[in-house]
Amino acid sequence: MLNVHGEWPLVGRDTELEDVRDALLDSSSRGVIVTGPSGVGKTALAQRMARQLDDSFELVYVRGSALASKMPYGALSFVLSDLDDAIVDNPLMLLRGLQELYAQRDDGRQTLILADNLEELDSSSAMALAHLVRVNAVKLIAICQSIDASPEEFCDLWKDGALRRIDLDPLDLASTTRLLSAALDAPVSRAAAASMWQITGGNPLFLQALTREQVDSGEMLERDGVWVAKPLSAPKTRRSMTDWIMVRLRRLPPEQREAIELISVVGAIPLDLLLRFVPSSAVDALQITRAIRVERTEVPLVRIANGLVSEVVRTQVPLGRGRELMRALAVEAQEWDIPALARMTFASWCIESGADIPAENLINAARLANRHRQGVLALRFIHAIPNYSALSQAVIEEARAMGVEADFAGGLTVLDQLLETHAEPHFEDWLDIRLLQCRLLMKNPSRYAEAEPLLREVRQRLAAEAVSADLNGLIRDVDELEAELAGYSGRYAELLESFGHLLTDHAAEQQNPALLGWLAEALAMTGRQDDGVRLASTIVARLLDTSTDSLLQEAAMARVFKLLVVSGRWSECLAMAASPSNHGKESAYDGSASEFAEGCLLAYGGRGSEALDKLLPALSQMRVHDRQHALPVAEAASAYAYALVGEARASLEHLERADHRPERLSWHSSRGVEYFMRLATTATHAPAEVAERMLQLADEDRALGNHGHELLFLCQSVQLGLGSVADRLVSSALASQGPFAEVCALYGKGIASKDTHQLMLAAQKAAELGNCRLAADAARLAAELAQESGDQVTVAAAGKVLRDVGAPGVAGRRGALESLTDRERSIAVLVAQGRTNRDIAQVMCVSVRTIEGHVYRLYSKLGVSSRSQLALLLE
């Protein structure tokens, strides 16, 4: 962690460094002009290149400043002392003297001038530097935020082709993650990295300042060798960074400053709404300086370009001066389409600042927070309402927030008290309460059986009320809940029986997307995987065309992802999980959800060390805050991944944690836990024993009618050596859809008939889909059978599959040694010496779990799967 408070590495700038190098070493080029926002790393880039080219150039550093800009040749004053006074007083002689001074170096090197902060250069210095560049007396690296704001001489040099322009953008998420990991000398969870990236906009200066403060304040902390972030923590900045931002804010004209404050308080404000409070000239000026950005959405939105600036300004807005303005904004904002997070941001600011905010606004903010799975924030909004317990909608959102935070018993108690203390509520409020009760009961491990009878009570009253009123909308809500209860319990065949009639084109167009989503899932689980994926994809396409609700779209995409997994399109799922678009700030998921999904898919495919590389950071983050309640599945997947790399003790530790489930998981999640837990026991139990348990689980799925999911367990039982059920695997696969079913059919036929051709087809297809373990099992068996019959062609083909899905060669692994950090190299040496994890932890003064995390990241980087392989590699 030494780098956090020292000099940070330069990461993610390889392309730009190469461009600068090419321009400086190209005889036809005079240099470069590097542009980009303040703090993006322009000076660091230029200095790095100057050091790298030290043998070729003599460096002269020039910097513009507000003070020197008021004096002729102020930026070059340190150079003038090398010239005669008579020359200095004559502009023409001065230019000739500078040209001779820099063009004739005794050591033969050319002069490289690094001119920083061009905007503050005095006109005389700008003219002199431009002259030196034009006559090829020097090479130049010029640095500015914007060419338009720099002296026109440099703009002319760029237009004439003498200087190449290099625009330096903020870092992307991947580069930000690498930079944080390098500075903290340990991996960073995807959730923590994505949060820091979103707040700082990938600006290295802000990233460095914020990371230092978050680490010092404990908002970022190391858990099990991984850096994670606490939930819902507002970014804290050092006084120096806050002052730096606020000084620049105070330099702005009043109208621009007011615009910045308004945008910061709201977070994202419609452009037309902003123009009701500030003139368009102020908005245009802020756009030119890139202080704000306008998103060209259906309703154009204005945001501060850098999230950290927005957060700092938001905390510094003086309420006394802005109270009336903010009150007017609050009134106007109700009629505008403002993003959910912006409404929550504004409500938070009102609470923090003591500003008046109507109870209705706080209830709406709590409702939005609950939809975004931010239960703690929702409770904060509700508890800020005076006497909130007298408002039924406030109490409903309080109970919902408790459910989001997995306090199901607490949420049920709150709703029971609401029904006891209030007069008979309006029917719609009563229905809201009862539907929420059903959902809380559904997840309560001791009371889930009460959900179905309560739903029947709701149905009965709804039928009675519908006699005298049009309640179609409410009926659809109850239908959705009934489908959800059935799906949560794994009763997909029953779900299709109740709602299958809605799958006709005409009926489906009128239905709630959530209900159709459950139907799509039911199709896939019962063996119609392709039909399920098609329906889910249709829902997504329809929502993208007709709805601006990002959470509905996101939920539909999550459903597509789940069904693609069941269908067997694992490579496609890996690409989806790794996509940066899944880490957006507007999401109801944090970055660790996608990191966890990647890890599970890699574990499922038998890629143990790669799976641990994703699962361990996700696990560390989930232990701080399990936003999606996926921790048991992650623990079980990690147990299996450890079993794959031969670490039985670590596998058993994760198995114990996976067995601890404070809530009732959905059927799908609980099956995932069972799947990985049973596979993990291969580290300590005979494969035949595990295969029998897998067959039992397959029987349970078949009894429920979930034939699509049955294939997952059935295939594993065959892979683990239960060849007697190969025929059943074939028949079940032929009755199902999707590429996984196709592979299972080929694999089962190959085993049942000892057909190497079928086995090789299964191996190749599994490898294409991303299931390395199944591909290896099929190829290995094909090779054994071919060896017995003397079929060397098949042996060679099987060997190629095994090589393709296996670890890289020794040469590649030795090359990967260069990618290790200093700490990882030290740990690798101790491992090679035969030291246990506990011994290494004592030597390095860290926890055993931290060392375990480092060891298995070493495995991933080096492509090894055991300590003996690592020791051999280091010999």
Image (spheres, rainbow, N blue to C red):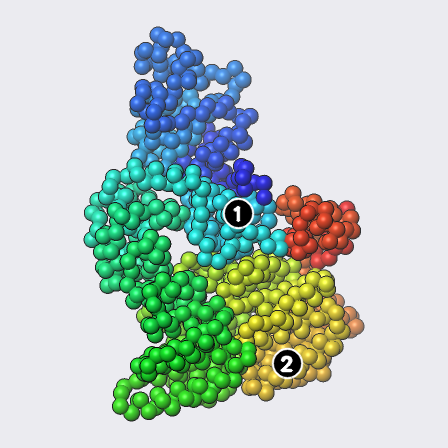
Quadrant of the rendering where the N terminus is positioned: top right
- Give how far apart the Cα atoms at labels 1 and 2 are: 45 Å
Q: Position of residue 304 (x, y in %)?
A: 34, 49
| Quarter of the view holding residue 368 | bottom left
Element on which disc 2 rests: helix
Q: Residue 371: image x %, image y %?
A: 40, 68
Give the left or right position of residue 335, taking residue 176 as reference.
left
Q: Earlier in the sequence, mark 1 or mark 2?
A: 1
Counting from the top left corner in percent of width and height, residue 459 is at 39, 88
Rendered position, 487 above or below 569: below
Q: Which mark is residue 697?
A: 2
Horizontal side of 396 relative to 690 (left or right) equals left
Residue drawn 59% across the image and 54% down it: 223
Q: Residues within 10 Å of mark 2 (few under 14, many from 20)?
A: many
Kind of residue indicated by mark 1 = Val
Characterize the local packing of mark 1: few (<14), some (14-19) or many (20 or more) Cα atoms within 10 angstroms: some
Res. 543 visible in picture: no
Residue at 28% x, 43% y is: 257
Q: Position of residue 704 (x, y in %)?
A: 56, 86
Question: As rendered, which of 494 and 730 lies closer to the eye?
Answer: 494
Q: Which residue is mark 1?
A: 215
Q: Nearer the viewer, mark 1 or mark 2?
A: 1
Task: Tell me the SS state at disc 1.
Answer: helix
Observer-nearest residue: 416 or 404? 416
Q: Amino acid at mark 2?
A: Leu
Residue displayed at 79% across by 72% down: 788
Tell which of 218 and 665 is nearer to you: 218
Image side of residue 166 versus residue 50, left or right: left
Residue 189 in sight in this render = yes
